[in-house]
Image: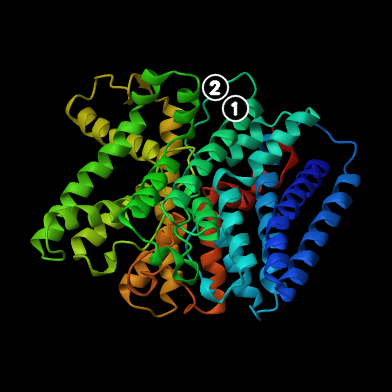
């Protein structure tokens, strides 16, 4: 295979080191709470991860800095499997009797920023709840991005690694070095998260709840209503904060990069940004009208507020259950599923196909109709003032077809669980988009009723959605394993 094994080991060791250090905050919480079992569990988990990190580092001292395209996909996959396995340890070791399958599911859901769950958060100790939120937050921007920044210090060109990790149709370079761009983006991510935390504290939300929810909503992983603390302090101001920051987290982080560079006109003229807000605005107004006509709420204002909340929840793939959408008319449920499939902007913490891909695909359909009428005409696909290359258009079409194909197969697989049609048809798309919330029995994002094989398949779907499928499916390609085909 001639894979860069030392690079893989070095990357995995860095990931384990970052994960082990991230657990220290939860370890400190367990000590502060006097929770002996959680203290022991996190102490063992942290120690194991840091020891393996040091062993991996010592085993990969002479590192080949050359990264091939297939190395990058394999490294990213190994990194995510590593971080998921490491994240499983606290669930198994805190002494609450959580099973292996449930622990794996929770770890995958946390790192892929899905609000799906099989372990009731109210049964978790505070230290584990904090670990769940920490996993959400780190997984939101991408744990591999931290590794790329570390690699830059080692002299490793991480452009290909970034291409395999970042979620979107195409990487846009905004600085001379990709590591510099990612460093700026992470600083912006930290800054926006800090602003949300401060606002939640000013709104009267208790410190612990404010912290975990700032991390979970910025990663579009939903709300962690531990011991119903959020519900007790759920004022309109708190609701607005959670909704607004879910939207902000779903914007292309390149938008913030342009703002930071004071390129305001260019930032707000971004075509994807305008399409995203247009989708939210149109569906919110339409949903509010339908809810009011069907009498789901007493007045138009309540209809509008709940419609906006539901639309943001699904379009940003946050999945927070604030608007009780399971009681909505079937027409609106279908619209919410479509919003979930489209998802947020490219290079954001949200899931789904992404607005950029959806826009190009929609324009490809329009171009196809135009070419039927004017077969000799030349009509490029334009995104704003920029033409989309045939290669990118073909890649986007292939990705969407692959997404739909995986959805059909997954719906058939999950139908073996013998749940109602709403559950069977919406669960796969909720998992693949990392939203977590569907309809039927998964309207509350709970998957505890699934069998053990079903839970593992659900975890697989969440990972597929987070890695945008290719990093996993490429391993089944014959050419991937043939050294003479690697470039």
Q: Is residue 89 left or right of residue 335?
A: right
Q: Which residue is mark 2?
A: 174
Specify the quadrant that holds the C terminus.
Answer: top right
Regarding residue 391, the answer to whether it shows in the image is yes
Specify the quadrant that holds the N terminus.
Answer: top right
Q: Which residue is mark 1?
A: 181
In the image, is residue 448 above or below residue 81?
below
- Which of the pair 124/89 is nearer the observer? 124
- Residue 49 position within the rendered picture, expressed as x and y whole percent measured from the top left: 79, 57
Residue occupying the far left of the picture: 293
Marks 2,1: beta carbons within 8 A: yes
3D distance between C-alphas at marks 2 and 1: 7 Å
- Residue 47 position within the rendered picture, expressed as x and y whole percent measured from the top left: 82, 60
**Residue name at image x 42 percent, y 38 percent:** 251
**Residue name at image x 57 percent, y 40 percent:** 190
| Residue 134, picture quadrant | bottom right
Mark 2 secondary-structure assignment: loop
- Which of the pair 357/33 is nearer the observer? 33
Q: Is residue 106 left or right of residue 225?
A: right
Q: Earlier in the sequence, mark 2 or mark 1?
A: 2
Q: Residues within 10 Å of mark 1 (few under 14, many from 20)?
A: some
- Residue 445 position within the rendered picture, expressed as x and y whole percent measured from the top left: 42, 67
- Residue 438 position within the rendered picture, expressed as x and y whole percent measured from the top left: 36, 65
Mark 1 secondary-structure assignment: helix
């Amino acid at each position: 295979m001639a894979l860069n094994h030392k690079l893989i080991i070095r990357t995995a060791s860095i990931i384990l080191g970052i994960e082990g250090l991230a657990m220290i905050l939860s370890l400190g919480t367990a000590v502060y709470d006097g929770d002996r079992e959680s203290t022991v569990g996190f102490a063992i988990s942290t120690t194991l991860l840091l020891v393996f990190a040091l062993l991996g580092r010592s085993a990969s001292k002479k590192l080949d800095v050359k990264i091939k395209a297939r190395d990058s996909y394999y490294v990213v996959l190994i990194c995510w499997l590593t971080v998921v396995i490491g994240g499983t340890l606290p669930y198994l070791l805190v002494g609450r009797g959580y099973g292996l399958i449930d622990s794996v599911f929770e770890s995958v859901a946390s790192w892929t920023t899905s609000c799906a769950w099989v372990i009731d958060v109210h049964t978790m100790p505070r230290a584990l709840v904090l670990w769940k939120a920490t996993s959400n937050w780190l997984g939101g921007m991408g744990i591999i991005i931290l590794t790329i920044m570390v690699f830059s210090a080692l002299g490793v060109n991480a452009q290909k690694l970034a291409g395999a990790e970042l979620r979107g149709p195409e990487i846009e370079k905004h600085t001379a070095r990709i590591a510099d761009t990612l460093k700026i983006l992470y600083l912006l991510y930290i800054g926006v998260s800090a602003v949300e935390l401060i606002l939640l504290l000013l709104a009267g939300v208790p410190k612990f709840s404010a912290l975990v929810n700032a991390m979970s909503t910025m990663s579009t992983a939903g709300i962690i209503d531990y011991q119903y603390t959020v519900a007790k302090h759920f004022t309109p101001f708190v609701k607005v904060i959670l909704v607004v920051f879910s939207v902000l987290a779903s914007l292309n982080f390149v938008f913030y990069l342009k703002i930071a560079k004071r390129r305001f006109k260019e930032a707000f003229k971004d075509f994807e940004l305008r399409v995203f807000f247009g989708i939210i605005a149109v569906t919110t107004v339409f949903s509010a009208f339908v809810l009011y006509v069907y009498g789901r709420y007493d007045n138009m204002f309540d209809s509008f507020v709940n419609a906006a909340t539901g639309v943001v929840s699904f379009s940003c793939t946050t999945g927070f259950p604030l608007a009780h959408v399971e009681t909505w008319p079937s027409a609106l449920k279908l619209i919410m599923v479509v919003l979930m499939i489209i998802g947020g902007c490219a290079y954001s913490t949200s899931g789904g196909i992404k607005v950029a891909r959806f826009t190009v695909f929609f324009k490809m359909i329009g171009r196809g109709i135009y070419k039927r009428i004017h077969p000799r005409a030349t009509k490029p696909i334009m995104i704003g003032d920029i033409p989309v290359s045939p290669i990118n258009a073909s890649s986007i079409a292939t990705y969407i077809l692959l997404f739909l194909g995986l959805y059909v197969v997954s719906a058939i697989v999950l139908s073996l669980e013998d749940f109602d049609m709403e559950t069977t048809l919406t669960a796969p798309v909720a998992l693949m988009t990392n939203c977590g919330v569907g309809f039927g029995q998964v309207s509350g994002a709970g998957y505890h009723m699934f069998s053990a094989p079903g839970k593992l398949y659900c975890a697989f779907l969440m990972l597929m959605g987070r890695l945008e499928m290719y990093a996993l499916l490429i391993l089944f390609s014959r050419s991937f394993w043939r050294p003479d085909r690697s470039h």
